[in-house]
Amino acid sequence: MSNPRISPAEPPYDPAIAEAFARVMPPGFAPLKLFRTMARNPRVLQRMFAGSLLDKGAVTLRDRELMILRTCARCGSEYEWGVHVTFFSAKAGIEEGQAAATVRDIAGGNWDARDRLVLRMADALHETANVPDALWEELQAEFTVEQLLELIALAGYYRTISTMTNASRIECEPFAARMNGA
C-alpha cells in the first residue's frame, strides 16, 4: 500500500481523545494508527468507539474473531486483519494456520462445522450483503437470534473499518501480522 492519504494525529492529543485512547488500548501500547487517523475527526472516532463490538457479547470470542478475520480478509484490509490476528487470535483459539487460511479459500482449512458456518456467512455477506435461505437454516440450527444479529453486525462494522483502512491507506502496524505471510 502506498503512503497514507490521511496522516495520523500526533501527540499531544486533545484530552478527550487521549482519554478515549487510554480506554481502548492495552497498557504499554501507543494508540493504533487507525485510531490516530480517525482522531482527525473526533466525532467519527467517538462514534466508532461507541459502536465497538469487542466487548463480551452474544457470540464466542472465536466466532467473533473468525467473522472479523474473514470479513477483513475479503475486503483486503491487511491493516485490520493483522491487528486482530496479533491481539486476539491466540486468545480465541485460532491457530496460526487457521488465521492464515482466512485470507485464502476456506474450503481446505482445518475448521469444525461451527467455524465453517461463520466463515460461509462472512463470505455470503461480503458477496451479496445477504444470506441465502439454505445457509440461514443451517445457521439457525447452530446460533440464537441474538448471535445471528451480532454476527451480521460484526460483518457490517468490520466492512466499514476495512473501507476506512483501505481508503485512507493506513500503514500496517509494525507489530501486526501480515497477510502476505498467510
Image (spheres, rainbow, N blue to C red):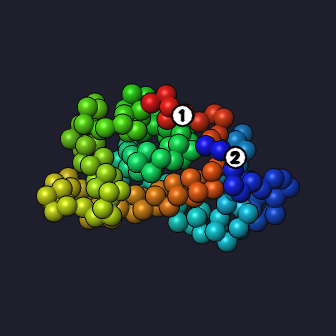
Instruction: Determine the secondary structure under disc 2.
Output: loop
Going by the picture, which residue comes out furthest to the front? 2
Task: Give the x, y percent position of residue 176.
Answer: 59, 36
Residue plotted at (20% across, 52% down): 142
Q: For this rendering, which residue is in front, 25 or 34?
A: 34
Q: For this rendering, which residue is in front, 48 or 58?
A: 48
- The answer for how far apart the CA atoms under marks 1 and 2 are is 17 Å
Residue ID for mark 1: 178
**Residue 136 sits in quarter:** bottom left
Point out the image quarter for the N terminus: top right
Residue ID for mark 2: 3
Labelled disc at residue 155: none
Q: Residues within 10 Å of mark 2 (few under 14, many from 20)?
A: few
Q: Earlier in the sequence, mark 1 or mark 2?
A: 2
Q: What amino acid is found at the position of numbered circle 1 in the picture?
A: Arg
Contact, CB < 8 Å: mark 1 with mark 2?
A: no
Residue plotted at (50% across, 61% down): 160
Q: Is residue 19 visible?
A: no
Q: Is 3 placed left or right of 10 in the picture?
A: left
Task: Give the x, y percent position of residue 129.
Answer: 33, 64
